[in-house]
Image (spheres, grey):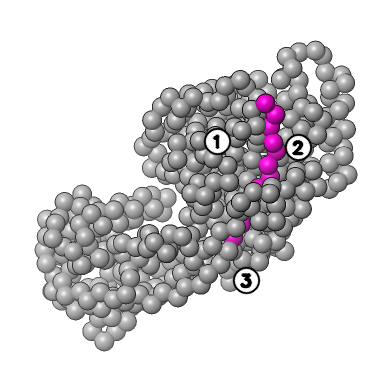
């Protein structure tokens, strides 16, 4: 890999020798963009997304191996260690996690027990302790439930709306919010697809649920428990009021039952790391641009390694190459005016935990952080662009700052020429991608942020997300867009103005 690095540096120097005289920033940007090579992207990704790294599960051995690899490569690039509070071993921001394994929720009724993966399906365990349920209140929508008062400690029953898997996250969040507003302890969703949901999503949840230890200590995330229950099993305790009889009725029917809902969640403690590669700026060094991608994935299930080559190995190797380009520029006396922090984060797959930890415990003040450029999956095509020209989805660039949006578009126009697709930037995007990657933890703190994404494909969170399926020419082109946007932001006279409210 050092041979490739030397070849990249030689290419950058040769570029500078034969380039015609032009605007200084343009020629320098292109010179160091030339150090970002398709071959190095491929070599890094072949390592990180190999079976040897065991799917890079958060807090587990494979993720530790990936963190060590990133540190070694940043050191080889000549990026100096940080000696600041909150930074370990020069390159790591370590954070504590609490892992809660799914399967601790039990429902007892009529001498029988219902369990996760058999009669029950859920995404997390929020119930603390035990709840006795003597009646279920039938309700018809989150709006109706949220408007209901005086149900504290009770449970409610709704019928599964059979929303598409992609919309399930939003569906669940709406019910949980409504239940918490109404003071409801448990929401039972009567469903015919418990087994299907487990087959489709069980692998994603098999690693358990993680929380930052600082949140677990405060009790954050406790609240309404939402659980899908096999409809036929639930019918067995409802007597004459089968779920089918409730269909079409107005909410409010009170159904006598005798249930005990208990949570025996098992907890363990883990540590994970964000990796920090800091390139100090020159005259504007106190201002900082942060570039992120998550390097963790979902690990191993049933002996199959989920390598996460696209999610988010692609973003990880892209920011490694961007870090190297800035480091080369600095070594040659052409470093950025503002400081640049390239930060592969972990814990994204468990709920954006690494970026959340940084946003709550920043190594550098967020008030001095001018923007965040975040990459999450830029190595493939989705079905909407199967035969299209080279593209990338751009999400969030205009949510807080017109200047950030303009910088990204200028970088694309001058250097790259991708088709910029803003479909998922729509405020009413049902996928809610704006809220689903690490940039959001910067945006919620008022830092302008942009998220680069190539869309969901058939191998998303599947064992088929392998290096062989990466389109490296597209990965390379998209990496160049992020680099050129970063170069503009790090070197222009003024930081992006926050002129919009999300």
Q: Quadrant of residue 271?
A: bottom right
Of 384 and 463, nearer the camera is 463
Image disc number at residue 327: 2
Circle 1 crowding by C-alpha within 10 Å: few under 14, some 14–19, many from 20:
many
- Mark 1 and mark 2 lie on one chain; the one further toward the N terminus is 2
Mark 3 vs mark 2, foreground winner is 2
Answer whether residue 493 is magenta in the image.
Answer: no
Quadrant of the image for the C terminus? top left
Q: Residue at x 61, y 66 (%)?
A: 60
Of 271 and 7, nearer the camera is 271
Q: Which residues are magenta?
A: 272-283
- Mark 1 and mark 3 lie on one chain; the one further toward the N terminus is 3
Mark 1 vs mark 2, foreground winner is 1
Determine the secondary structure under disc 2: helix
Left/right placement of residue 319 relative to residue 239 reads right
Q: Position of residue 294 (x, y in %)?
A: 59, 50
Left/right placement of residue 254 relative to residue 198 reads left
Mark 3 highlights which residue? 303
């Amino acid at each position: 890999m050092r041979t490739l690095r030397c070849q990249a540096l030689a290419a950058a120097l040769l570029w500078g020798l034969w380039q015609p005289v032009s605007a200084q920033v343009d020629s320098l940007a292109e010179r160091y963009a030339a150090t970002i090579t398709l071959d190095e992207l491929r070599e890094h990704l072949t390592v990180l997304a190999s079976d040897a790294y065991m799917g890079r599960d958060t807090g587990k051995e494979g993720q530790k191996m990936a963190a060590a690899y990133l540190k070694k490569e940043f050191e080889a690039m000549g990026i100096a260690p940080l000696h600041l509070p909150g930074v370990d071993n020069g390159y790591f921001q370590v954070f504590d996690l609490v892992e809660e394994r799914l399967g601790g929720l039990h429902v007892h009724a009529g001498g029988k027990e219902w369990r996760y993966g058999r009669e029950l399906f859920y995404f997390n365990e929020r119930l603390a302790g035990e709840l006795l349920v003597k009646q279920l209140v039938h309700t018809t929508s989150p709006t109706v439930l949220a408007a209901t008062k005086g149900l504290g400690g009770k449970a409610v029953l709704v019928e599964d709306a059979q929303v598409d898997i992609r919309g399930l996250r939003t569906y669940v969040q709406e019910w949980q919010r409504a239940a918490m507003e109404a003071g409801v302890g448990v929401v039972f969703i009567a469903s015919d697809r418990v087994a299907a949901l487990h087959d489709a999503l069980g692998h994603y949840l098999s690693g358990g649920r993680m929380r930052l230890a600082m949140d677990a200590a405060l009790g954050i995330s406790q609240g309404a428990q939402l659980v899908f229950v096999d409809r036929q099993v639930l019918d067995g305790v409802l007597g004459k009021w089968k779920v089918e009889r409730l269909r079409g009725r107005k909410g409010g029917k009170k159904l006598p039952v005798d249930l005990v809902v208990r949570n025996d969640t098992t907890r363990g403690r883990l540590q994970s790391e964000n990796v920090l590669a800091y390139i100090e700026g020159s005259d504007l060094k106190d201002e900082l641009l942060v570039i992120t991608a998550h390097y963790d994935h979902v690990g191993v299930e049933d002996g199959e390694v989920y390598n996460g080559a696209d999610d988010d190995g692609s973003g990880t190797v892209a920011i490694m190459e961007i870090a190297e380009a800035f480091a080369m520029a600095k070594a040659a006396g052409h470093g950025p005016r503002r400081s640049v922090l390239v930060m592969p984060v972990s814990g994204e797959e468990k709920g954006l935990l690494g970026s959340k930890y940084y946003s709550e415990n920043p190594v550098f003040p967020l008030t001095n952080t001018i923007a965040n450029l975040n990459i999450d999956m830029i190595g493939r095509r989705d079905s909407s662009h199967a035969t299209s020209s080279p593209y990338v989805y751009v999400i969030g660039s205009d949510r807080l700052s017109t200047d950030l949006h303009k910088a990204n578009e200028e970088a694309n126009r001058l250097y790259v020429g991708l088709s910029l697709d803003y479909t998922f930037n729509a405020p009413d995007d049902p996928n809610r991608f704006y809220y689903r990657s690490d940039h959001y933890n910067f945006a919620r703190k008022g830092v302008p942020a942009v998220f680069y994404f190539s869309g969901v494909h058939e191998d998303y969170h599947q064992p088929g997300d392998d290096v062989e399926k990466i389109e490296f020419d597209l990965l390379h082109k998209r990496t160049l867009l992020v680099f050129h946007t970063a170069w503009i932001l790090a070197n222009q006279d003024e930081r992006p103005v926050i002129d919009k409210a999300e």
